[in-house]
Amino acid sequence: MNKKTDTPMTSLSPDSHKDKDVPWWNRPVVGEDSIVEDLLGKLSKEEVSESALFLHNREMTDLKVFAKTAQAIDNEKFGQEEFLVFVKMQYLLRKGINEYQGLYESLQLLKVAIDAKDCFISIDQAELRYRGTKQQEFYKFVESLLSDHEDKAAFREQVHMRLADVLPQIKTEEGRTALQNYAKYLDQLSDSELGLKLLSLFKAYQLADYSILRVISEMIQSLGKRDLLDFKGLVSLVRVNYGVFEKLRDIIGLSERQSTPETYGLMIQFIALSNRHGISHMKFDDLIKVMKKWYKPYQAVIGIRHEHPPTEYKQPKEFKEAIPGVEIYEKYKKWLTDKKTGMVFIDFGDET
């Protein structure tokens, strides 16, 4: 939950008096709330210092740049209910709040496993079909490398170095092609460090039935244009296929307590929403990155204006200018705040 509080925006209008609506000819010449007191008050107000005004205008210049960029990215799709639910889920997962606690990495592993299902299946089929001595030595080398490599680049380099040594020793063209394809699938998996971690886990838990990934993938694809906010319906779908999900429990790192239809329901809901709104969410992320840059000068401008209230300072015309981009900030803060609990599902001040 976002515990930060924003500096509230206050009215920038001239100072008010309890008798400000009384015509001047009906006010006393001297004394409390008199014409003379009002005149002396205005004459006694300080000027805003040049340094403060310089800082204010410098920050306003930055705000104009960021606001223009944000306005170009902003899209009406970002206001759709389903999209906003997806954004909130992202926040809850990353922060590990409520039922999402401890699910982030498990969900990432499941998503990568489903996305890379064809690679896993092809690797498995190659290991089962091509069982020559040299091929088996290569498979064992890869398995040992999975548990001990510095990074994905080093993994790829070592695989291809060993492949170059092994290929000339394989007698048939079919065998050489099969091993080259095997290395190609390993390359594709290594696009993500999680892909290599998954392959290592599948081997460690001796789960060779990669077809379960296809079952889950087809289940998610079958949702099509279905209402993904119908969580009860998603949980019912999981219950029918619960045994399939249970086989993946150890692979994706769920505890026995977490391994429930409701947990898997959250996971397929998230993945389905990601498939449907992934491109839009990438653009939304760009918008939020800009707004996080916008937020710092915004706070600075608000701070300078509050330090120089109209009750004590003569207000320069620059202080009366609307703050560029504030309408976008207020819109998303409103949309991403839970009305019942007050939880804010976004943190513009968080630069991480």
Image (cartoon, helix red, strand yellow):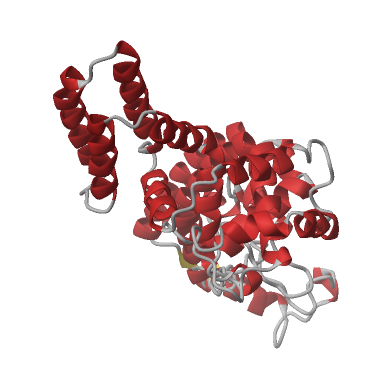
Q: Quadrant of residue 161?
A: top left
Among all residues in the image, which is located at the extreme top? 173
Residue 64 as seen in the image, left or right of residue 11? left
Placement of the N terminus among the 4 image quadrants: bottom right
Q: Residue at x 61, y 76 (%)?
A: 257
- Seen in the picture, residue 28 relative to 264 is either above or below; the reply is below
Nearer to me, 62 or 328: 328
Residue 9 as seen in the image, left or right of residue 4? right
Nearer to me, 8 or 332: 332
- Seen in the picture, residue 227 relative to 122 is either above or below; the reply is below
Is any part of residue 348 visible from this angle? no
Q: How many marks?
A: 0
Among all residues in the image, which is located at the extreme bottom? 31
Placement of the C terminus among the 4 image quadrants: bottom left
Q: Residue at x 67, y 49 (%)?
A: 327
Q: Position of residue 23 (x, y in %)?
A: 84, 69
Is any part of residue 31 visible from this angle? yes
Q: Residue at x 50, y 63 (%)?
A: 250
Q: Position of residue 83 (x, y in %)?
A: 72, 46
Q: Position of residue 233 (x, y in %)?
A: 85, 55
Q: Position of residue 276 (x, y in %)?
A: 69, 38
Q: Quadrant of residue 234?
A: bottom right
Nearer to me, 64 or 129: 129
